[in-house]
């Protein structure tokens, strides 16, 4: 079977979703991508072994594993556990292709500086959702004695001696906070970082580093890190992924289904669960389990904005839009973190949604029902939102470039099939 894509080309890979069925059933939530990446970077700080359990087997983790191997680490998988031996780390050069392939490769900056005093990395470059600059990372590390030189699309960072300082970020960037913490763990003296981000994944990074012997305390976005001489071997179990859990809940709400999520990071999902309740979902929580009855989750949300944690996460803004598109009534969603995160609206409107974007605000007229058509994933969370919309839509949706979605979701298509969805995978020639 061959389909013509919008631009006249031929689809290479696509999924076919027959929508309109409520999702029902039980799922376990995978390990967190955004916790795994800085923790994998953090494993470089130690001249020995780190074992990570509940590690998601997704493309971004595979990319990070490939980089660690390039740098001289031994990395092995056993089921969902990763063992990293960074005893023979020998390179501080991250090859060019990773800047494009995985923007979060910049998270290696702090730990390479901490371990080797040098890092040579590709600039991450912009992407569909925004420019993704790293000025906050570089300014903060500069204050710790790091010199930066840029050449073409790369930069080299070097420090004779990393020294603890009192620093303040102009904005609580997640990546910059992680880079400063990673650089400070083995630095000389005390680093005090003010206005740091407080995302749960940073709390996880702290828990991981403390388990290796780092000395770090945090209170309301102020991090105090006392440099230590060395770290030790450790074993660590990653928290579940709050964005994956949220995506599954919005999919169940959009299809008016009822699902149970096991191993859910409930404590980190307050803003998301509040939004679902505002839509009419009935939610019960017990331990790490979320039981959601979304049969009446068709109410609009008059106004909601994305914010740094503990606010509503930008990474769930697109799946939320998909669910609100099939609500009954008017909603407004404001994006305050990334400047270009509404690309998915074009595709949702082609499916019959009624969404108008004005700057960083999307105004939605919930239309109750949308219909299947051809759509294309352009980035991870927008792609996941199109899948949510396709599950709720009447008829068949052909979703091109599902590879984007796999970057962050271990087994999303099989998971939704387990909940009763009809999803078929196609590949050109396959
Ligand atoms: C991380 C998450 C991403 C999430 C985001 C916000 C990982 C691997 N990724 O991304 O899923 O959407 O947090 O919660 O954890 N900015 C600057 N200069 C900088 C750094 C950031 O202007 O030096 C801007 C960015 O362009 C963006 C905003 O600050 O508009 C937030 O970025 P940041 O918090 O750094 O996000 P990431 O760490 O890239």
Image (cartoon, rainbow, N blue to C red):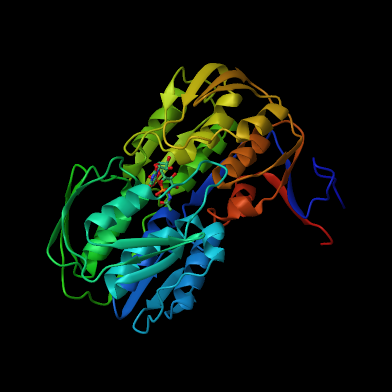
Tell me the quadrant of ligand 1.
top left
Look at 43% across and 57% down and name the residue there.
31
Residue 110 drawn at (x, y percent): 32, 63
Q: In the drawing, does residue 194 fall left or right of residue 378?
A: left
Residue positioned most to the right? 1
Look at 40% across and 50% down and name the residue there.
134
- The answer to which image quadrant residue 375 occupies is top right
Look at 40% across and 52% down and name the residue there.
263
Look at 78% across and 55% down and name the residue there.
12
Depth check: give the residue in front, 381 or 147: 147
Image quadrant in which the C terminus is located: bottom right
Residue 159 drawn at (x, y percent): 27, 68
| Residue 280, visible in the rendered structure | no
Residue 54 drawn at (x, y percent): 42, 63
* Image: 345 above or below 368: below
Label tally: 0
| Residue 402, visible in the rendered structure | yes
């Amino acid at each position: 079977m061959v389909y013509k894509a919008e631009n006249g080309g031929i689809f290479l890979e696509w999924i076919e979703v027959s929508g309109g069925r409520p999702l029902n059933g039980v799922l376990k939530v995978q390990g967190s991508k955004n916790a795994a990446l800085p923790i994998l970077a953090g494993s470089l700080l130690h001249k020995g072994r780190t074992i990570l359990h509940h590690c998601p087997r997704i493309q971004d983790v595979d990319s990070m594993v490939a980089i660690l191997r390039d740098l001289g680490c031994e990395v092995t998988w056993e089921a969902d556990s990763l063992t990293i031996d960074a005893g023979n780390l020998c390179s501080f050069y991250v090859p060019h292709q990773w800047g494009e392939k995985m923007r979060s490769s910049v998270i290696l900056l702090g730990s390479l500086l901490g371990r080797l005093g040098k890092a040579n990395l590709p600039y991450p470059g912009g992407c569909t959702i925004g420019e993704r600059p790293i000025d906050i990372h570089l300014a903060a590390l500069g204050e710790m004695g790091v010199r930066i030189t840029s050449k073409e699309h790369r930069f080299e960072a070097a420090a004779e001696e990393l020294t603890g300082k009192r620093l303040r970020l102009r904005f609580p960037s997640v990546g910059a906070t992680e880079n400063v913490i990673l650089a400070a763990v083995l630095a000389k003296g005390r680093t005090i970082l003010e206005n740091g981000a407080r995302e749960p994944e940073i709390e996880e990074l702290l828990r991981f580093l403390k388990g290796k012997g780092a000395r770090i305390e945090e209170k309301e976005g102020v991090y105090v890190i006392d440099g230590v001489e060395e770290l030790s071997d450790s074993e660590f179990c990653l928290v579940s992924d709050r964005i994956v859990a949220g995506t599954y809940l919005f999919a169940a709400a959009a299809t008016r289904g009822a699902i149970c999520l096991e191993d859910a990071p409930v404590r980190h999902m307050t803003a998301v669960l509040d939004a679902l309740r505002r839509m009419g979902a009935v939610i019960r929580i017990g331990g790490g389990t979320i039981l959601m009855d979304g049969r009446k989750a068709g109410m609009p949300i008059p106004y909601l904005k994305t914010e740094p944690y503990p606010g509503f996460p930008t990474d769930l803004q697109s799946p939320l839009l998909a669910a609100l598109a099939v609500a009954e009534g008017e909603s407004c969603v404001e994006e305050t973190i990334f400047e270009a995160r509404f690309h998915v609206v074009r595709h949702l409107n082609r499916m019959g949604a009624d969404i108008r974007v004005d700057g960083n605000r999307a105004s939605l007229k919930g239309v109750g029902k949308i219909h299947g058509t051809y759509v294309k994933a352009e980035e991870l969370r927008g792609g996941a939102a199109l899948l949510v919309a396709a599950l709720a839509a009447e008829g068949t949706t052909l979703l091109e470039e599902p590879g984007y979605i796999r970057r962050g979701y271990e087994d999303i298509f099989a998971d939704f099939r387990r909940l009763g969805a009809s999803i078929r995978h196609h590949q050109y020639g396959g």
